[in-house]
Structure formats: structure tokens, C-alpha cells
Image (spheres, grey):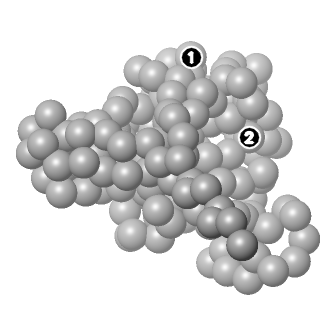
Amino acid sequence: MTTPSPISQLKIRCSACKKETAFDQPYAYHAGFSDQAFLYDDAGTCTLVFSAYEEEFSSVFGHLMPWTAKDEEKKRKFEDLLPPSPNGGRWRFANSARCPHCGAKLSGPMSETIYYLLYPGSLVLNDVRELKKGQPVGTDNSGAAPRRV
Ligand SMILES: [Zn+2]
């Protein structure tokens, strides 16, 4: 038997505490390639990724792409539609990705960068409305179910 090659992990060294954080992704993902939007929670250690063309998102933002939207009230309205993150915080457009060890910023929010980091336990959704149907558990059927990473 051959040993399966290990999953390539992106490692980012915190400039503040010098500790490395590993992400289960080979590199920082580019949201624009797949028309995705992403938000980090208040702690900055969980990621919500969803389709930027998702219906509810469009109803709030119209034709604006999420990373160019300047309308703070619309952003807040959308944030308020979202249930809390699994960690208890809120998903905010202004939240940065943060070092799990010391809280220093590792990567900026969608308004600063198109690249995102996927923390363990992050939510990758085809449809934001999946979140409001209750806790996203039971991913054993239907490809539309939220995928926990
Ligand atoms: Zn740190």
C-alpha cells in the first residue's frame, strides 16, 4: 500500500507572536475566480464563504459585487440576516482573519483582499439561506448541504 500524500497546508507565520497557523488549503483562495464572498467572525478565526450571486445577497446588494460595495447600511443589513458564527461571534464585513494564538491580524477582510483563509470549522455554502434553516449539521446527503471544513 502506498501512503496517501499529505494534504498540502498553507502555513502562515504570525508577525506578532511568530507562531505558525496551518490551514487546510494549499494556498490562499481567490474569491473572485469562483464568484465567492467571504466574511470572518468577530474572533477572526472562522470563515463564512458563500456565492456572491446568491439570491439573498443580490437582494441586498443589487448588482454590486460584494468586495466593492461601499454602502455600510446594506452591509449591516446583510450581516444582521446572518446567524452567529459557530464560535458565537458575528460575521462582519470589517472583520479580519486573526492569529488564533494572539489575535494579531493575518489577512484583511473582503474590502482589502480578494484572498481568503479557511479556518477549521469554517462554513462554505452554496446558499447563505442554508444557515437560517438551523444549525448546519448532517452533511451526509444532498450536495446542497453546507460543507464543514
Ligand atoms: Zn500571533
Q: Is residue 92 visible?
A: no
Examine the rendered structure and indicate whether residue 6 appears above or below residue 141.
above
Examine the rendered structure and indicate whether residue 4 appears above or below residue 14.
below
Q: Tag 2: residue type? A: Ser
In the image, taking residue 66 as reference, residue 43 lies left or right, namely left
Task: Answer whether labels 1 and 2 touch (C-beta < 8 Å).
Answer: no
- In which image quadrant can residue 119 be found? bottom left
**Can you name the residue that lies furthest to the left here?**
17
CA separation in Å, label 1 and label 2: 15 Å
Q: Secondary structure at mark 2?
A: strand
Residue 130 rendering spot, x and y as whole percentages: 74, 64
Query: Mark 1 packing: few (<14 Cα in 10 Å), some, or many (20+)?
Result: few
In the image, taking residue 113 as reference, residue 34 lies left or right, namely right
Q: Tag 1: residue type? A: Thr
Residue 69 rendering spot, x and y as whole percentages: 56, 20
Q: Secondary structure at mark 1?
A: loop
Residue position for label 1: 68
| Residue closest to the eye, 145 or 68 | 145
Residue position for label 2: 51
* Numbered-mark total: 2
